[in-house]
Amino acid sequence: MRAAATASAAQGGNWPRLLADRLGDIAATWQESAEVCADATWQARATGTSALRLLDTGHLPHADAPVVTRALRHIQLTALRYDFRCRRIEALLDTLPARTKDELDCYTRALWAFALLGQSRTSGYPLMEQVLDESGLHAKTVHVLLHGLWLGHGLPGREEAMLRLASMPVLAGDPIARFRAAAAHRGLGNYRPALKAIDDALDLLSPEQSDVRADFVRERCLITAADDIGRLCGTPGEQGEGSLR
């Protein structure tokens, strides 16, 4: 992809601004910006150079060029997402003028939906569906929505929605999607499908993804523990998929 080299070229210094400027130079699409900014922001967080250390989180960044502004927003809001700062994402986006809100790209609106769903707000559902309809099932965008559902609690139809998103062809063979599916199956009390999903996720993880392997193992422990508790209490899985024995 033409934008792939921009992340490595923007290492060091104020990397968010350098990366955004480079994306502006090539007139990156919102999809290209989302893909590059999401990956670069995750890597920076893992190496102790989080964008939140370099951007003023008191307001949304702005630049003269629309593509640069969009990229800076992608970086800042994604960094807040990785730190689960849902209220901050919502507060920042709420400050935008109505016209600007109407013109936001799908990835930014997905981050808004993430913030609402992550706070267990049902108002995130209509926005999620709107983004899905308009995004062309862009993988990074679906991941953001799935992440919000996973973080939320007590949302009606939450687990079913997670399974729908996790099974989309655009996420086929994706270990994170299988991890989210495992959590959804666990929430429904379907422990056999949950265990299969998490074992698939562990198999799909590459050696370089050691940063999330512990989360996957933790999910597997939650599944087996929930199954044990259900059997001890005489309440197997809700849909006949409960006991692993």
Image (tube, grey):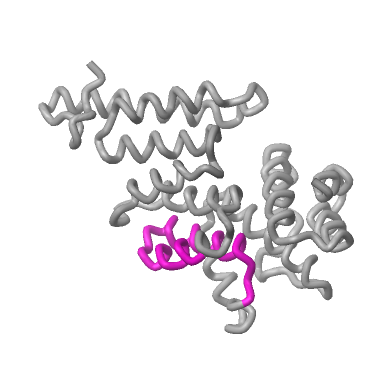
Q: Residue furthest left?
A: 234
Residue 107, magenta (yes or no): yes
The answer, for residue 61, to whether it is visible in the render is yes
Q: Residue at x 18, y 28 (%)?
A: 230
Image quadrant where residue 66 sits: bottom right
Q: Is residue 63 left or right of residue 205?
A: right
Residue 231's spot in the image, x, y percent? 16, 23
Image quadrant where residue 60 sits: bottom right
Residue 70's spot in the image, x, y percent? 72, 66
Q: Is residue 238 left or right of residue 90?
A: left
Q: Residue at x 33, y 36 (%)?
A: 185
Question: In the depicted view, which residue is nearer to us: 165 or 188?
Answer: 165
Image quadrant where residue 32 sits: bottom right
Residue 84's spot in the image, x, y percent? 52, 51
Residue 43's spot in the image, x, y percent? 71, 40
Q: Is residue 167 left or right of residue 187?
A: right
**Vertical arrangement, residue 223 with respect to residue 30, above or below:** above
Which quadrant is home to the C terminus?
top left
The answer, for residue 88, to whether it is visible in the render is no
Which region is colored magenta?
Answer: 103-130
* Secondary structure mostly taken by the magenta-highlighted segment of the chain: helix
Residue 228, magenta (yes or no): no
Q: Residue at x 39, y 43 (%)?
A: 163
Q: Is residue 26 left or right of residue 189?
A: right
Q: Residue at x 82, y 54 (%)?
A: 19
**Vertical arrangement, residue 124 with respect to residue 189, above or below:** below
Q: How many marks?
A: 0
**Vertical arrangement, residue 160 with respect to residue 68, above or below:** above
**Vertical arrangement, residue 124 with respect to residue 2, above or below:** below
